[in-house]
Image (cartoon, rainbow, N blue to C red):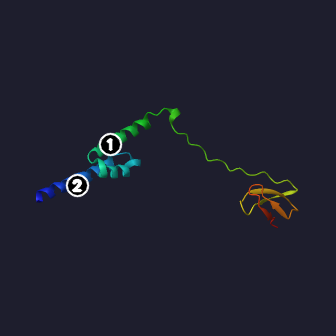
Amino acid sequence: MLNAWLYVLIAVIVWLSCGVAAYLAGPERYAGRLFWLTLAFMGPLGIAAALIMKTIEDFAQSSAPDHLTPIKLAAPQSKTAPAAPPDKRKIRCPHCNAELLVGKTAARFKCVKCNEVSKTPD
């Protein structure tokens, strides 16, 4: 009976060691997944899978032609709205936050985006 428990303990230790080895040997971005995948299903084969994934990732990074490397785009510049004409003023709709041009003497306005009628702020 003790002999059987000893074999189970050795198997658990080997299985956990394989999970740790897969975690250390695999690519950094998949390290956690490889650890749990190895613990759950793969066992000793997880180490081989981690090494193969690391080799493939290294090869893909080193041999990618220039036209396949990702291009980093600059952040889009914020666009400023043009100034309002002299007889109009800019206001924001209180319902949809759309920017509108309204006559300076208008008491009410209808939003072109949400079609709500509102009072113009003073």
Position of 103 with respect to 114 (left or right) is right
**Type of residue at label 2?**
Val
**Image disc number at residue 49:** 1
How far from the left and from the top, in percent, is residue 34? Answer: 35, 49
Tell me the quarter of the image containing the N terminus: bottom left
Picture quadrant where residue 9 is located:
bottom left
Depth order, front residue of 40/103? 40
Is disc 1 placed on a helix, strand or loop? helix
As helix, strand or loop, the secondary structure at mark 2 comes to helix
- Mark seen at residue 34: none
The crowd level at tag 1 (other Cα within 10 Å; few <14, some 14-19, many 20+) is: some
Q: Residue at x 34, y 52 (%)?
A: 36
* Residue wearing tag 2: 12
- Image quarter hosting the C terminus: bottom right
Mark 2 Cα-neighbour bin, 10 Å: few <14, some 14–19, many ≥20: some
- Return the x and y of residue 118 as percentages of the image width and height: 79, 64
**How many marks do you count on the picture?**
2
Q: Amino acid at mark 1?
A: Ala
Q: Residue at x 75, y 52 (%)?
A: 81
- Name the spot of residue 6 as percent of width and height, x first: 15, 57
Q: Nearer the viewer, residue 117 or 87?
A: 117
Q: Position of residue 67 (x, y in %)?
A: 53, 33
Earlier residue among tags 1 and 2: 2
14 displayed left or right of 74: left
Residue that protrudes farthest toward the bottom in the picture: 122
Q: Nearer the viewer, residue 84 or 9?
A: 9
